[in-house]
Amino acid sequence: MLIQIVIFVVALTVLIISANSFTRSAEIIGHFFKMPPFIIGVFIVGVGTSLPELVSSVASIKIGVSEIVSGNVIGSNISNLLLITGLVAVLNRKEIQLSHSYIFIHLHYLIGAFFIFTIISYDGTIYWYEALIGLLAYIAYAIYLVRNENKTNDINENKKVSQNAFPKKEVIIIFITSLGIYLGANYTVTSLSQIATSLNVPPSIIALTILSIGTTLPEIVVNITVIRQGKAEMAIGNILGSSIVNSLVIPAIASFIGHVNVPETLIQFSLPLMLGSGLFFYLLTHDKKISHWEGSLFIFIYILFLMETVL
């Protein structure tokens, strides 16, 4: 089992590094083609930070352990809202002011996304025609954001990026990192499944805890960078956007390959906790701010979740 643990750690590291490099290169190419920063942030960076969850979910379907998909989605959402938000609020060292209206657009779609995921997974199986509803909801969300951005003329704030030639290096990096993402995801899921078998623990539980923490590392890295730039509110937007992608896009793409099983253990405890975390986050941020102490509370709740799940 020690060998499988080493393989899991190495494969997850390759997956995360490849996903980060892929996202950075895609962002540079987006700037070359003069894409608006908003579009780059919401779609390239937002979806890019969810690549580990997405690719590992596809890999788990292919090897016949689809319960990893539901465990990873639920665990990543809980990690995003409680752990990463808590870290952002604590590291920021002052109240995060949620002044921009797009944050509350994210909030409303987040609650809707959580409800959709809960409804389609509550019977224990996610079928493609159910998950398609979530994918259509994400498309509607994306269209709304783009139209709203055009109305507010934020597109005019586009950075002037001097590119003398087509970024060939970034294209090569995208091809190499795509291979890294594919191999990293396959070995991550395969080793995780074997570790679960050795420990006599359901793969969904390991996906809910260890894998979900690992696949949210890109969000942690991105958001710490954003905090250092003095843009804590943007970090909250990244967290919410990533959770929306996790809830609507990942189950849909995975279910197109095969049925996604949702174990009863997740339905009884983790799924309601995910939905409750979303509602709690929604209510707590209605005063348009997140304090240092509220961030500490989020982290404390996440620790309780881990203890209840593992012990």
Image: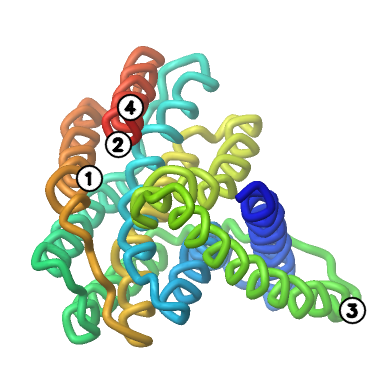
Q: Which residue position holds label 4?
A: 307
Q: Please report whichever mark, 1 or 2, sits nearer to the chain's N-terminal start.
A: 1
Q: Are marks 1 and 2 in contact (CB under 8 Å)?
A: yes
CB under 8 Å between discs 3 and 2: no
Question: What residue is rendered at 25% in x and 30% in y?
Answer: 285
Q: CA distance from mark 1 to mark 2?
A: 8 Å
Q: Residue at x 49, y 29 (%)?
A: 88
Q: Whole-Å distance between the Cαs marked 2 and 4?
A: 5 Å
Residue 215 seen: yes
Mark yes or no: residue 46 visible: no
Mark in front: 3 vs 2: 2
Q: Are marks 4 and 1 in contact (CB under 8 Å)?
A: no
Residue at which label 3 appears: 165
Q: Eyeballing the image, is 41 above or below 201?
A: below
* Residue closest to the eye, 50 or 183: 183
Q: Is residue 144 above or below residue 276?
A: below
Mark 4: which amino acid? Met
> Callout 2 environment at 10 Å: few (<14), some (14 to 19), or many (20+)?
some
Quadrant position of the C terminus in the picture: top left
* Quarter of the rendering containing residue 140: bottom left
Q: What residue would you read off at disc 1?
A: 270
